[in-house]
């Protein structure tokens, strides 16, 4: 039987001469109709470059294929004219990208972006397209977005943006779906729903899926076969059962053994409070009519009180749109809010911009989307150096470069990477740069907004170990926002569970995770720790 997708002896290089980088080296893999093949490996292993090669979306002529072939339904795709590729893209072959905010047009509404592929490939009328858009948003668990079709991407949370991307990719019922870390930004309950949705659609339409991920739990639940990549090569491939139960390659065994583990250092209940919030509220007005009168509010954060203590971590969990990130930004005065916020004895609500400036160094944030938070025009060194210059740290330029080199090593990057630019790094590597930018200022309090969501398992474990070590060494206080409850368990002393802008449960980490009191928290725990593949291969909780 002819394979739907056949990749044979494919190589990808960037640059030429002494600066040539071999990103992919002589790989071969195939996908049959209705089959799911997982492409697994650490950041920078060549997974996404392989996917972009199939779509012919690499930046030519900077990127080249010195050898190899990619055929789809027997049709060669390498060097296929772009006009012919556009017929395939979004219709027969579709792709979900890793970083939704950088893939969605910031100036176009959600409805316009999803409708675009329907107009282009299905020639739908506006009414037909709108009905299909609403159907797709409901399919991916975004029922509330059907009343916000005119909203722009930045008005949605990271998880909601990813679901919009998934809806767009599924719009034309493609024969081959390339999913590049499609559940990275999703909370655990929506992740289970989306995986089940993909399985259901696959069974209904016979769709093949190339699933790129670093989450081995998802691989076990979703894939029929696995290809393991390392340093641009496929080092092992085979059926899921064989790879998980009887791995032949040392690197594969390393991946299977990598997962955040352990617990944070025990905390003293009398530790000094670094930052506290009392009845914190962030309400966004809803304006309608010609005079734009306020008719209601979106209550993103609705009366939350909490405290983060010296040397301790407060874990914040909840579904996408629950207000987790908004709460973190409000505490740092990056979001206008009401209520009391006290940092190290300073009433932040009473301070103006100039009054806040000296405290900024001591309050840092690592954002969820690393690519969106790193300037593409600055080198990594310049990005990290910016904070040092603003706050007058590091003295001379050579001293600042030394500080930058040291912090890059701390987060697992080479010192000379400071002379490169964000687009030259994988998603996981960019996240490590974001962490380095915050750490270099040696702050007292850090809001970590999904800091490990884009990282592969082994790097997640390294970052968790690094954060715990830094916390112990410098008595740092963290607010750790995450939908990954395995990571939350590994770092948190206390946890608050958020739903629709409110705290529905709070307490010591072990108590909340092991003995949740509310039905909502129990549902989150079940989705995180009990996700399994049933006999049909669908994901259930």
Image (tube, rainbow, N blue to C red):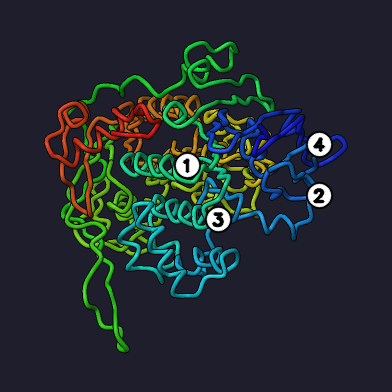
Comes first in the chain, label 4 or label 2: 4
Disc marking residue 435: none
Q: Which residue is mark 4?
A: 20
The picture places residue 254, in percent across and down from the top left corner, at 53, 16
Viewer-nearest residue: 524 or 111? 111
Give the class, few, some or many, for how many residues have Cα within 10 Å of label 2's Cα (few <14, many ≥20).
few
Residue lying farthest to the right in this orientation: 17
**Percent position (x, y) of residue 144?**
30, 61
> Circle 2 is placed at which residue position?
61
Which dot, 1 or 3, sits closer to the camera? 1
- Judge whether 481 appears above or below 146 on screen: above
Residue at x 16% of width, y 28% of height? 511
Find out whether the residues at labels 3 and 4 contact each other: C-beta distance under 8 Å. no
Q: In the rendering, at what x and y percent does residue 424 appear?
A: 67, 43
Alpha carbon distance from label 2 to label 3: 22 Å
Circle 1 residue:
202
Give the Cα distance between marks 3 and 4. Answer: 27 Å
Pick the residue in front: 291 or 221. Answer: 221
Q: In this rendering, would 88 be left or right of 389?
A: right
Q: Which residue is mark 3?
A: 103
Q: Earlier in the sequence, mark 3 or mark 4?
A: 4
Distance in Å between CA atoms under marks 1 and 3? 24 Å
Of label 1 and label 2, which has the lower sequence position? 2
Please report the residue visible at 52 percent of the width from the left and 70 percent of the height from the top. 124
């Amino acid at each position: 039987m002819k394979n739907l997708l056949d990749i044979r002896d494919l190589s990808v290089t960037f640059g030429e001469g002494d600066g040539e980088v071999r990103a992919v080296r002589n790989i071969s893999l195939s996908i049959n109709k209705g089959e799911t093949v997982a492409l697994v490996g650490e950041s920078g292993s060549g997974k996404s470059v392989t996917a972009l090669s199939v779509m012919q979306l690499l930046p030519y002529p900077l990127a080249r294929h010195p050898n190899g072939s990619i055929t789809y339904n027997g049709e060669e795709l390498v060097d296929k004219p772009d006009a012919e590729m556009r017929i395939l893209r979004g219709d027969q072959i579709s792709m979900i990208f890793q970083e939704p905010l950088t893939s969605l047009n910031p100036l176009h509404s959600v409805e316009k972006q999803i409708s675009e592929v329907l107009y282009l490939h299905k020639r739908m009328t506006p009414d037909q397209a709108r009905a299909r858009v609403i159907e797709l948003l409901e399919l991916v668990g975004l029922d509330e977005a059907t009343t916000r079709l005119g909203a722009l991407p930045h008005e949605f949370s990271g998880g909601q943006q990813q679901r919009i991307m998934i809806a767009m990719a599924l719009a034309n019922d493609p024969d081959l779906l390339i999913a590049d870390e499609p559940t990275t930004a999703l909370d655990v309950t929506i992740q289970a729903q989306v995986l089940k949705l993909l399985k259901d659609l696959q069974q209904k339409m016979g769709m093949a899926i190339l699933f790129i991920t670093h989450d081995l739990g998802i691989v076990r639940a979703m894939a029929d076969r696995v290809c393991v990549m390392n340093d641009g090569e496929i080092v092992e491939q085979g059926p899921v059962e064989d790879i998980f139960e009887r791995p032949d390659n040392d690197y594969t065994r390393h991946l299977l053994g990598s997962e955040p583990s352990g617990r944070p250092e025990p905390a003293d209940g009398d530790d000094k409070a670094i930052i506290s919030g009392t009845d914190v509220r962030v309400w966004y007005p809803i304006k309608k009519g010609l005079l734009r009168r306020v008719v209601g509010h979106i209550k993103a954060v609705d009366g939350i009180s909490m405290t983060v203590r010296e040397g301790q971590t407060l874990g914040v969990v909840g579904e996408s749109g629950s207000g987790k990130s908004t709460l973190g930004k409000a505490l740092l005065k990056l979001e206008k809010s009401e209520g009391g916020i006290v940092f190290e004895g300073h009433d932040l609500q009473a301070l103006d911009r100039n009054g806040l400036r000296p405290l900024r160094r001591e309050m840092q944030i690592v954002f969820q989307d690393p690519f969106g938070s790193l300037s593409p025009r600055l080198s990594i060194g310049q990005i990290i150096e910016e904070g040092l210059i603003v706050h007058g740290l590091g003295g001379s330029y050579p001293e600042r470069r030394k500080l930058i080199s040291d912090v890059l090593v701390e987060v697992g990057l080479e010192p000379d990477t400071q002379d490169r630019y964000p687009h030259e790094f994988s998603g996981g590597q960019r996240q490590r740069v974001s962490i380095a930018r915050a750490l270099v200022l040696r702050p007292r309090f850090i809001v970590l907004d999904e800091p490990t969501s884009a990282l592969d398992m082994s790097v997640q474990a390294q970052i968790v170990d690094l954060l715990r070590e830094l916390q112990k060494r410098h008595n740092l206080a963290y607010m750790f926002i995450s939908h990954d409850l395995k990571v939350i368990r590994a770092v948190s002393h206390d946890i608050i569970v958020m739903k629709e802008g409110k705290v529905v449960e709070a307490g010591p980490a072990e108590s909340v995770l092991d003995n949740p009191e509310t039905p909502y928290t129990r549902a989150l725990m079940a989705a995180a720790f009990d996700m399994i593949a049933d006999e049909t291969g669908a994901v259930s909780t």
